[in-house]
Image: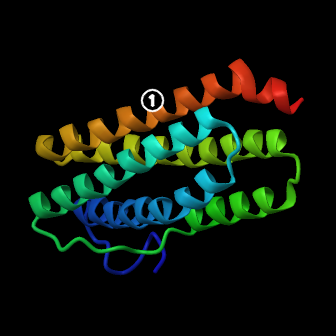
Amino acid sequence: MGLFTKDIKTMNDLFVHQLKDMYYAENQIVEALPTMIEKASSAELKQGLQAHLSETRNQVARLEQIFRVQGVTAKEVDCPAMDGLIKEADQVSGDIADKAVLDAGIIAAAQAVEHYEIARYGTLIAWAKELGRSDCVSLLMQTLEEEKGADKKLTTLAENRINRVAA
């Protein structure tokens, strides 16, 4: 099912469709993070990814809450963008033998995911505001702030130590 399908007739339909896309994306991240944690060699990176895995599980639950508020069954639709980001992360991490360089690659892959999520949640917030769904806005804002925080932590890890060690 593509983004612009026959079942999308209203802005609310588009909003719900994008929620389903993010529900799929967040669940894919929950599945992918344990592998990234396992491959990471930096204790700080492992700890940060583990913390974000816990956050992501909460984000999945928050999306389920938004579906309930919308009166819609929590359901996924494929997110080719997230599939591509995860596939790229798997390919890159499979090709790097040097553990320090691998950690830098893991951060880069994780930040690509975070940036995608930041863009999508920003859009969902804008749409929820237009639709008068302040109940959804506050929940989506919590997730957006967590995603921004995760991105900032990854940047700090990379710039303070990991990139230097990898170089």
Tag 1: residue type?
A: Gly
Residue 151, given in percent of the width and then of the height, sits at 54, 33
Which of 33/151 is in front?
A: 33
Asked where in the image residue 61 lies, by quadrant, the reply is bottom left
Q: Residues within 10 Å of mark 1 (few under 14, many from 20)?
A: some
Q: Is residue 4 visible?
A: yes
Q: Is residue 46 left or right of residue 136?
A: right
Indicate the colouring scheme. rainbow
Residue 108, given in percent of the width and then of the height, sits at 70, 42
Q: SS of the residue at dot 1?
A: helix
Q: Residue at x 28, y 36 (%)?
A: 141
Residue 100, given in percent of the width and then of the height, sits at 81, 39
Q: Is residue 75 left or right of residue 123?
A: left
Task: Find the residue positioned furthest to the top.
Answer: 160
Q: Is residue 132 visible?
A: no
Q: Residue at x 19, y 37 (%)?
A: 138
* Quarter of the C terminus within the rendering: top right
Which of 34/124 is in front?
A: 34
Mark 1 highlights which residue? 149
Residue 136, given in percent of the width and then of the height, sits at 18, 47
Q: Is residue 5 above or below residue 26?
A: below
Q: Residue at x 29, y 50 (%)?
A: 58
Q: Is residue 33 above or below residue 103?
A: below
Asked where in the image residue 63 lies, by quadrant, the reply is bottom left
Q: Is residue 42 left or right of residue 69?
A: right
